[in-house]
Amino acid sequence: MSTVLHQPGTGISRALAPVYSALAQYAGLPAESLDACSTETGHAPLERLAESFGLSSFERDLLLLCAGVEIDPRFAGALAALPPNTVPQCRPTFGLALACLKNPHWSAISPYSPLRRWLLLEVESGDSLVTGALRIDPRILLYLLEVPTADEALAPVIRPVAPRRGSASPLQRTNAMELGVRYWLGGVHNGAPPMPLLLVARTEQTRMAMAQEIADACGFGLAQLRASEIPPGPVERDRLARRWAREAVLTGSALYIESGNGERADEIEAMTAFCARLHVPIAVGMPQELTLEHLPGLRIPQPTLSVEQRRTLWSESLGSLAHQMNGMFERIVEQFDLPPAEIAFAGALANLASGPGDGGEKTWQICRQRSRRSLDQLARRIETRAQWDDLILPEPQKQTLRQIVTHVRERALVYRQWGFEERSARGLAVTAMFSGTSGTGKTMAAEVIAGTLDLDLFHVDLSTVVSKYIGETEKNLRRIFDAAEESSAVLLFDEADALFGKRTDVRDSRDRYANLEVSYLLQRMEAYQGVAILTTNMKQVIDPAFVRRIRFIVQFQYPDAARRAVIWQRIFPARTPVERLDYERLAQLNVPGGVIRNIALQAAFLAAEEKQPIGMKHILEGARCEYGKLERSLTPAETRGWI
């Protein structure tokens, strides 16, 4: 006997009645048992199901026969009345359907029929297709019963996207996105399976917002699948595609596939094959310049917002708070190139978090936090604590660093209001090269610039970005710059020598591709809205043709004795106990500022262990330890007169 899963409602009971009548008549039940059966068959979910999947009348009745066994005990009674061994475990078979239902046809049980192709019912193991027991899929049964649910087999990989709150700003609707709406709706209404929409944007959040905007305009729900979760095996992949296509029809939903930065050949192959199996609206989100752009489909680029459009969106999201920001509103508009959805979210957060008089600062910090998330995964963020007084540099070098800050702060005035960007779009970026040996203050100078501008500082080791595989270096650089565009953070590219060696003379294919890598980096630096800084220990190995494209060059000189004495005076925090330190004698140590810091830290721990103030003997021991790391020995000239 079957288990009664649900007390059937009036609609489904009417639809089941003719099928039960046919079954009861075939089973030879008394005529009075048929009196309670209505002849009205209208049931909206069933009609939608039959129309959407193209079911014939026989296939429709066969599906109802399997559903009736699950929800109506009369069906089980009719099956029990059949001769022994007619149906296995009192479940319907295709042979029974051929015998008792109208307009039978053998193609209904074919693997390519709608019933089996879309997994509406399952044929359990048996001696043959005719004698195997049939079972309706639980998702389809609950759909017919109008029970809100979802396919539990899809839940681990395909997740519904929560509906967006409020309507989108008109600035988010581009002609390309309107074309995407017509493309999806046209494919649905005309029965033509549309190819994917290819949503191309810098960040995953922007791509998702584009998919939601298009789905909302079409009246579709939206679900998300990550490309890395598409099964690599063709059998599992095909079953997932069929399950989703079925779910898309039942729920009126589109599927958004996020490619992330995955460019593995097997993932691309799996995604391409998966999309080819789907005949429902799908969108694929991808960053710019990704290999997947060659996937067939309609390409929808990220809406590009001008500064004026960003200003309008910020005004809408901040409301009255925009006029209470003590002049910071224009700086926020200029600095953070956030997509519309992020601007709306940041504005809502700012209104919740801001108090009297601090709206500008709170909004600025919210923008920093929201825009750094993607870059945090690709580069190391450095907390900026250094101040201008910590930089022990000649005045010309300090003045150049101050000019870098000025070029960032005043770029809106010079480029836009004074019209310099109308003359040429080239050379408007703030790029710099810091040259000097290790420990001379290059990273500290970048900290000071970022701290002065109240921006994040991200350290990128170019030696880890450069790849021996052709094209991989550009991909690595592209990910970093794309992630940094929203925040315009200060990017510090360390170890530029790994990429910038003299390569003007092309002697082999590797030299030619290395030149392309350098040109790509400089091209992205010149287009970057933030500050991009290269550091090198050997400026002389960098080709002058590349150096000429850098706006600022700062040479960090090895500190002389006078500057080393100043560094020693400032290296210890104010609360640190020191005793009779002779800074002129300490300056005899011929080391740069970075090594001085390490020696001071070693001395502090030695003094702490002895519970004494830091003295010359502790610094001497710390110097010996640090020199050992450098494979150097202290000279008599460096320690003369210490103790």
Image (cartoon, rainbow, N blue to C red):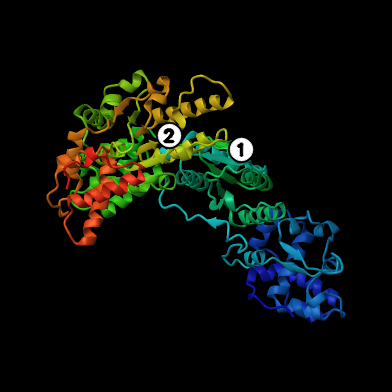
Q: Would you identify the image quadrant in which residue 181 lies?
A: top right
- Examine the rendered structure and indicate whether residue 633 appears above or below residue 526: below
Q: Nearer the viewer, residue 73 or 583?
A: 583
**Rendered location of residue 98, percent (x, y):** 85, 65
| Residue drawn at 69 percent across, 53 percent down | 233
Q: Nearer the viewer, residue 9 or 187?
A: 187
Reading the image, the residue beneath label 1 is 297
Q: Is residue 35 visible?
A: no
Q: Amino acid at mark 2?
A: Thr
Q: Is residue 15 left or right of residue 225?
A: right
**Rendered location of residue 202, percent (x, y):** 46, 39
Q: Amino acid at mark 1?
A: Gly
Which secondary structure lies at badge 1?
loop
Q: Earlier in the sequence, mark 2 or mark 1?
A: 1
Q: Which mark is residue 304?
A: 2
**Rendered location of residue 39, percent (x, y):** 73, 69
At label 2, counting other C-alpha atoms closer than 10 Å, the crowd grade (few under 14, some 14-19, many 20 or more) is some
**Rendered location of residue 382, percent (x, y):** 33, 46
- Examine the rendered structure and indicate whether residue 408 appears above or below residue 602: above
| Residue drawn at 74 percent across, 61 percent down | 60
